[in-house]
Image (cartoon, rainbow, N blue to C red):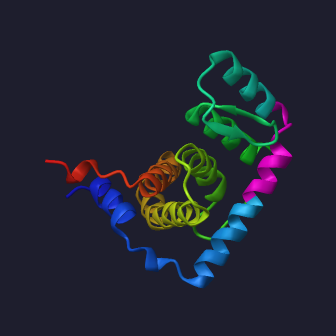
Amino acid sequence: MGVTEQLARFAVESPSDFMTAPLIESAKAKILDTLATSLAGSRAPATTISLETVRQSGGSPEATVIGWGEKSSLVNAGFVNGVAAHALEYDDITSGVGHVSGCILPGVLAVAEQANLSGRQLIEGFAIGFEVQARADPECRTKAAATTHRVPQRAAKIATAVRVIRFRPFLIN
């Protein structure tokens, strides 16, 4: 079993009881912090340029663009909200892991809204993504330094989405 399959299985098959009260509170705090920085960053030049580009590309209204009162496609809303989360450089930092919340939350919010998921499912997906980032990041840093620092962030985003929609392609034979 390769690393990708291991991470996907971890994301899907981890029991929900991993969500301890302290973990839930930590996830909530990180989510609220990221929502606040996203709202503050929603009017930053990079965000408004991104939003205008997204508006021109169209798409079905599936997920909310933070701070604008409008919806865009799942991918486009996640993109614009990700730009907003990082726009003012206020995103949170976790020692040894980095700026994870601003990488994960925009995607999990879009997926959760589009799929009409519960708050618990959103928090669970966020926590799984955070855990994947925390596990993968130190390994990548020791292997290839700065050239691979985005790999754990991408893995965390995918793990988050996989968890919230319970995607199980590796179980299909």
Q: Position of residue 37 (x, y in %)?
A: 80, 53
Judge whether 81 appears above or below 141 on screen: above
Which residue is situated farthest in the left direction here? 173
Rendering quarter of residue 53: top right
Q: Which residue is found at the position 52% from the left and 52% from the top? A: 153
Which residue is situated farthest in the top direction here? 56
Judge whether 53 appears above or below 107 on screen: above
How many circles with numbers are drawn on the protein? 0
From the viewer's side, name the closer residue of 159 and 142.
159
Can I make out residue 29 in this image? yes
Which quadrant of the figure contains the N terminus? bottom left
Q: Which residue is found at the position 62% from the left and 50% from the top? A: 109
Whether residue 44 appears in magenta in the rendering, the answer is yes
Say left or right for 163 vs 172. Answer: right
| Magenta segment, prevailing SS (helix, strand or loop) | helix
Q: Position of residue 87 (x, y in %)?
A: 78, 42
Q: Position of residue 103 (x, y in %)?
A: 61, 50
Which residue is situated farthest in the bottom direction here? 21
Whether residue 166 appears in magenta in the rendering, the answer is no
Can I make out residue 90 in this image? no
Q: Which residue is found at the position 66% from the left and 77% from the top? A: 25
Question: Which residue range is magenta in the image?
Answer: 34-45
Rendering quarter of residue 68: top right
Say left or right for 46 vs 122. Answer: right
Q: Which residue is found at the position 52% from the left and 66% from the top? A: 124
